[in-house]
Amino acid sequence: MSDRNLLLFTRSWRLFAYGALAVVLVLYLTELGFTTSQIGLLLTLTLLGDTVVSLLLTTHADRVGRRRILILGAVLMSLAGLVFALTSNFVVLVLTGTLGVISPSGNEVGPFLPIEQAALSQVVPPASRTSVFAWYTLAGALATAVGSLTGGSLSEAFHNYRIVLLLYAAVGLLLAICFTQLSPRAEVSRVERGASWLGIGASKAIVLRLAGLFALDAFAGGFVVQSFAAYWFYLRFGVSPATLGAIFFGANVLAGISALLAARLAARFGLVRTMVFTHLPSNVLLILVPLMPTLSLAVAVLFLRFSISQMDVPTRQSYVMAVVGPEERSAAAGVTGVARTTGAAIAPVFAGLLFARPALISMPFFIAGALKIVYDLLLYRGFVKVRPAEETAS
């Protein structure tokens, strides 16, 4: 199997596990007896711990070896799933979530995404990078969708949420085995190493600016992580776990398919314009979701939102890889990724407090949508004229 196909394969299985877990995680923790405020704190500490671990791993990946770090991340994922399935001790769960790899959102956490992005950029030509990232996003979205469906169905069929945690742990083990097959082509050559601050040299200023904006976007998204969004549907409409799985299956399928269109739009209009002008309307739709009076209308608006909301993902990833040097890619993706994780980690504490008050359970949607609109405007203003080499050459 080629490195490209191997990384698409590992991405798919990982997001399958993340999607399965996200649908049931808050329900599982609620069943254990934790309050929504405790759950929000746990998810925040989990994401903050992941931030520190990911930063340490990704900024050293090009020196230590990308394959080694990916294997280590997979082991941490497997162990975290196993411990979450076997204990209800809050302190142990916090420590495990902090040091391990647990995804409460259904989105990427851990060192995987930055390193895989860097490796893919290494093994495909620049002209194909955005298209490959679109397929990479599609693979993840479809896998998340299937995982959401599987997680909801399994937990309902077995009347036990722990089965999903054990599945999560098994997938982590599978990933560790798969990463051993990654070839030396995916590694950066030794002569290219030697960048300074956190593995970044000449691109430090642009990476930090992007990191700040991505943190704002992720902080906004942290109010409506998939676990809390699923919980909102449960509180508002009494939706069962199996139905929740079906809802987020459909949403993630739409998100994945839209990624392919994003690559075509970027080829015509540029990466930054595509990022902003597909993301803005999706945030208006996010604000509209809790205003819908019925389940069918709320799901319809959610689906419409997901059909355009993720078009910025492959374009954003491709943009970061395009504006830094090859020897900086793992670190740049790691720093911007950690910025996103940090932003996302802070929000669940506030979301948990809002969910603890029945009258405020819809506020996270309004806050998230408004902040994301601010992010889009700032991104366009700051980077529309900073164009990658392949765009200026065309």
Image: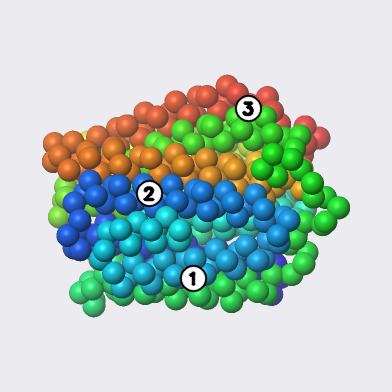
Residue at 52% x, 53% y: name it. Answer: 53
Say above or below: 208 vs 235: above
The mark nearer the N terminus, 1 or 2, is: 2
Q: Residues within 10 Å of mark 2 (few under 14, many from 20)?
A: many
Task: Kindly identify which residue carries mark 3.
Answer: 383
- The amino acid marked with disc number 3 is Phe
Q: Quadrant of residue 188?
A: bottom right
The percent coordinates of residue 324 (x first, y second) are 73, 40
**Left or right: 49, with 119 as reference point:** left
Q: Cα distance, mark 2 to mark 3?
A: 32 Å
Residue at 36% x, 28% y: name it. Answer: 370
Say above or below: 190 vs 292: below
Determine the secondary structure under disc 1. helix
The mark nearer the N terminus, 3 or 1, is: 1
- Residue 33 visible (yes or no): yes
**Left or right: 189, with 139 as reference point:** right
